[in-house]
Image: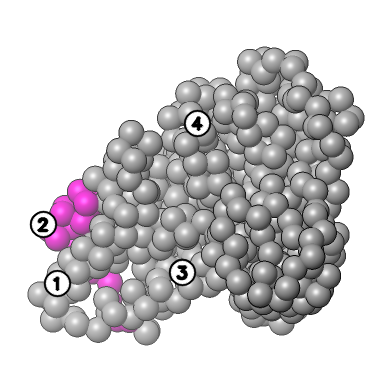
Amino acid sequence: MWHLIGGMALILSTGTVNAAEMGHQLDLTNTYWGWIALGLFILAYVVVIFEESLHLRKSKPVIVAAGVIWLLVATAYAAHGDIHTPEIMVRHNILEYAELMLFLLAAMTYINTLEERGVFNALRGWLVSKGFSLRMIFWITGLLAFVISPIADNLTTALLMAAVVMAVARDKPAFVAVACINIVVAANAGGAFSPFGDITTLMVWQKGIIEFHEFFNLVIPSIVNWVVPAIIMSLTIARDKPAPMAEAVEIKKGGFVVIGLFLVTIALAVSFHNFFHLPPMIGMMTGMGILKFYGYYLKRSEARHGTRYNQSGSDAEEVTSSMSDVALGSESKMGEEQGPFDIFSQLQRAEWDTLMFFYGVILCVGGLGALGYLGLVSQLMYTDLGPTKANILVGILSAIVDNIPVMFAVLSMLPKMSEGQWLLVTLTAGVGGSLLSVGSAAGVALMGQARGIYTFFAHLKWTWAIALGYAASIWAHLLVNSHLM
């Protein structure tokens, strides 16, 4: 489903809008405005990379850089007598970011609600009761991420699986880090062979370059992309079993209903986009509205029966209390005994640093696009290199910059390529982001969800193994789909 937002986030990412609406876009790559903007973006990303050691949230540098970059864009265009184009460009950026943020906010609220209702703790209990070792859990969560992401999307799937891993082995940071890397790779690989699995695949599909069924030619390369690094990483995982739980964990009242509502919300997002040609964000927000109504029912029900839960979501405890003890609308604090369910508490727990990071990155890249950098890079790639080398490079660039603007630049150029080459660039753009933790939405989101455990450097330690999978998937594509090249 993120694919859908992506269909628009791509326009925002490059800052490229219909020429009739915004006039002529300038090439300012060889001006001091362009040099300063590029330098700021690089500096901001360096600060993001060292987030762990600096103890500085990743959203802060990119938000500041975004503002300064667009100030440079506006100044540069004004110097050329154009005071309107930058405003139109940045408004498109903001509009598309709003769709992305609201989509993510709805998904995060559902994830937080499922966690509060004890769904993930219950899944943890099930995994432990089945006697699965950490290595088996590693493979189960990776497999689920690979299988679910083509149907839903890689970001939501990664968030779900990471929540399970955190519930299973929160006290084993080394395992959580490796498992999160596995989930990111699996979710990105699974999303690469479906228009519904990743933003870039949706873009190619919407452009009419590859038909829906033709994406499934990438199934085998995608499997190879995940399995190769997964096998290598699994060798470092002990066969230890998580400590058995002292007592059984039951899902709180309404937990299964929330699961059903989440599935309905996903269906709404897909349906709004496919059948009614509306932004999928509307479907997600509609689903969150339904969750809020159900949350109201839960709040009233729990307040009426005097039910309190501790924050861990384990055992429920019936208490006799006055209405003042469980006043409707009361705020609950992490680590303290909770009163009746409050949907706005789950909304507050959304990963706001991640949401703000997306804002900064989107506007930074959009500003660089307005200055002509993305077009320049794309032109150089397909002019000086052959399509195969250029398409492989697209995947590497997507890990550094972002796959959305890189793919949009390729689609804007529309180089003459065979179906096999278009499938190759779809594959590399989809899985290339796995090379770095900041290279994909799934990686960025999981850095927020497992903050301090799954980090840029933790991921970087395994980039060599992921790169082997990246190379192997390209080889598999060239072999299996040679007739399309």
Report whether 343 appears left or right of 54. right
Residue 449 colored in magenta in the image? no
| Amino acid bearing label 1 | Thr
Label number found at residue 32? 2
Quadrant of the image occupied by residue 208: bottom right
**Residue 403 visible to the viewer:** yes
Magenta region: which residues? 22-40
As measured in the structure, the alpha-carbon distance from the residue carrying label 2 to the one carrying label 1 is 11 Å
As measured in the structure, the alpha-carbon distance from the residue carrying label 3 to the one carrying label 2 is 28 Å
Q: Nearer the viewer, residue 258 or 77?
A: 258
Instruction: Answer with mark 3 or mark 1, whichever residue precedes in sequence.
Output: 1
Instruction: State the residue position of label 4.
Output: 459
Number of dots carrying numbers: 4
Query: Residues at badges 3 and 1 in contact (C-beta under 8 Å)?
Result: no
Give the structural element (helix, strand or loop) at label 4.
helix
As measured in the structure, the alpha-carbon distance from the residue carrying label 4 to the one carrying label 3 is 26 Å
Instruction: Answer with mark 4 or mark 1, whichever residue precedes in sequence.
Output: 1
